Amino acid sequence: MRSFLATIAAATAFLAAALSGCALQHPAATGNLHPNLIVVREFAFSPGVVTLDPSLGFSLNRGEPGVPAERRAESAARAAAFSLADAITQQLTQLGYDAAHIESGGAEPGGRALIVTGAFGGIVEGHRHEGASVTVQAEVDYRAPNGGLQQLSSFPMDSRRVPAGGLVPAPGRLGPDVNYQATLVGAAIGRYVGDLARTDKWPGAAAR
């Protein structure tokens, strides 16, 4: 916990220094609708980081092959990546920030942005959802109005060490599956980025 707080403190100091020379411009003066956007990207993955549920993937038709393991792994990873990015975006929006799940582009010309991105280190389906987990390495970058990009923070997150925070499995689920785990991590990352933004007085959506 001490090292995690130290990471926030270091990122906070860096962001404050980066913003010190950037006077905020009113959107009416710049024509920007999103001058202080928080951009959320889907985290990178490879099928190799996925550990599949051995109880799934067979064919219901005798004699026919099931879905190939590599295709199953890619499908599971894509779903987890979307769930993660969506949860980060929703958490930041609930905290009052102008956040958007965008896969290309970012801040408008003359605007600035915080960019949340990263990569999956592991996606474990477990056995019929028992023991499912997700680990990621997250990154927060600052994009200046002139287009310059600087890394503010990089930190790991493990769904097995993140409090549920009121989240419950979706109706009909057998338990907290991989998408639930990704949502859990995404909400935690959103809170982290929100704390960082609030400490440095990053304008909320109402400031547009």
Image: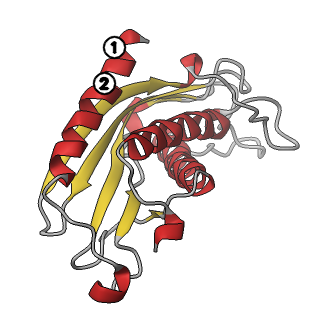
Would you place residue 139 above or below residue 25 in this image? Answer: above
Residue 39 position within the rendered picture, expressed as x and y whole percent measured from the top left:
39, 60
Q: Which mark is residue 58?
A: none
Front-most of residues 75 and 102: 102
Residue topped by disc 1: 3
Q: Nearer the viewer, residue 112 or 135?
A: 112
| Amino acid beneath label 1 | Ser
Residue at the (63%, 24%) spot, across then down:
132
User: Seen in the image, is 94 located left or right of residue 9?
Assistant: right
Q: Which residue is mark 2?
A: 7
Q: Quadrant of residue 57?
A: top right
For residue 31, say whether it is visible: no
Q: Secondary structure at mark 2?
A: helix
Disc 1 residue crowd, few under 14, some 14–19, many 20+, Cα 10 Å: few
Amino acid carrying label 2: it is Thr
Separation of disc 2 and disc 1 at Cα?
6 Å
Q: Position of residue 208 (x, y in %)?
A: 46, 74
Question: Which of the 4 quarters of the picture holds residue 70?
Answer: top left
Going by the image, does 185 lie left or right of 142? right
Image-quadrant location for residue 152: top left
Give yes or no for contact between labels 2 and 1 (Cβ–Cβ under 8 Å): yes
Name the spot of residue 165 as percent of width and height, x first: 70, 30
Q: Residue at x 27, y 65 (%)?
A: 112
* Badge 1 element: helix
